[in-house]
Image: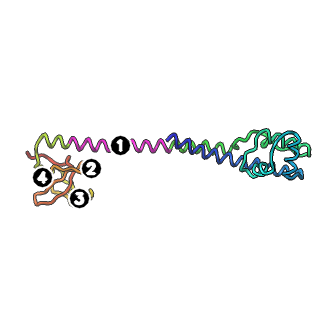
Amino acid sequence: MTEGLEMDNFHENGIASAVVNRQTGEEVRRAREAAKMTQTDIVRELARINVEMSVSTLSRSEGGSREFKGAELQAIGEVLKARGMALGPTEMSDAKPPHKIREFLRRRAIIIGISGALIGLLGLLGMIVALNVATSARQSDVQSAATGCDHYRVASRDLWLRNQYDEAVEQLPHDADVTYSRKQNAAGHWEIVTADGRHGWVDSSYLKPQC
């Protein structure tokens, strides 16, 4: 679960960085065009102050596919300032996700964490239920083996005979005699045979031993 969360956060941070890169590149491009400078002009002026950058690198950075380095932004800012155009504080600062993006990432991490906890809790509850069913079935087997009794009487007025799919087939009469076939299903129900030869599954807690 931790690995999945880290991968998801990595993915979201990558999206956030791409958004910031595009925003920064767009601001640099607008400022450059406002200063009436081409990309070649910028590269030429950068070379004069010993900052290496090719036209293709500047183009990729303005397009958002490459992140501007802090030193590059500072140098470009100085070049544009000499032309009477300045980059805003957002572009001159280190690239960080805007507040809305950071808030989105924080909420997404919280939702993922809560979802993981709920899934884990549901899994634990399922294991507890399965363990209880298995324990109940084992207890019934022990009880039946201890008594050695196969003959029972229906001790309830609303006991239903069920098929292999746990579907109610018919209601068994009160005090009806049945025979336990020593078989149980996953739900812990006993397979019984009625006096007239019908087979089915019932809840053993509603049977009273007759031996």
Q: Residues within 10 Å of mark 4 (few under 14, many from 20)?
A: many
Whichever of callouts 4 and 3 sits on the residue coming sooner in the sequence is: 3
Colouring scheme, one of rainbow, by chain, secondary structure, one colour: rainbow
**Mark 1 — residue?**
127
Q: Position of residue 210 (x, y in %)?
A: 9, 47
Looking at the image, which residue sits at the far right?
Answer: 83
CB within 8 Å, label 3 to label 1:
no
- Image depth: mark 1 or mark 4 in front: 1
Q: Position of residue 174 (x, y in %)?
A: 15, 54
Q: Position of residue 73 (x, y in %)?
A: 80, 42
- Give how far apart the Cα atoms at labels 1 and 2 are: 14 Å
**Mark 4 — residue?**
179
Residue 123 appears left or right of 52: left
Whichever of callouts 2 and 3 sits on the residue coming sooner in the sequence is: 3
**Secondary structure under badge 4?**
strand
Residue 181 appears left or right of 99: left
**What is the three-letter code of the residue carrying label 4?**
Thr
Give the label on residue 187, or none: 2
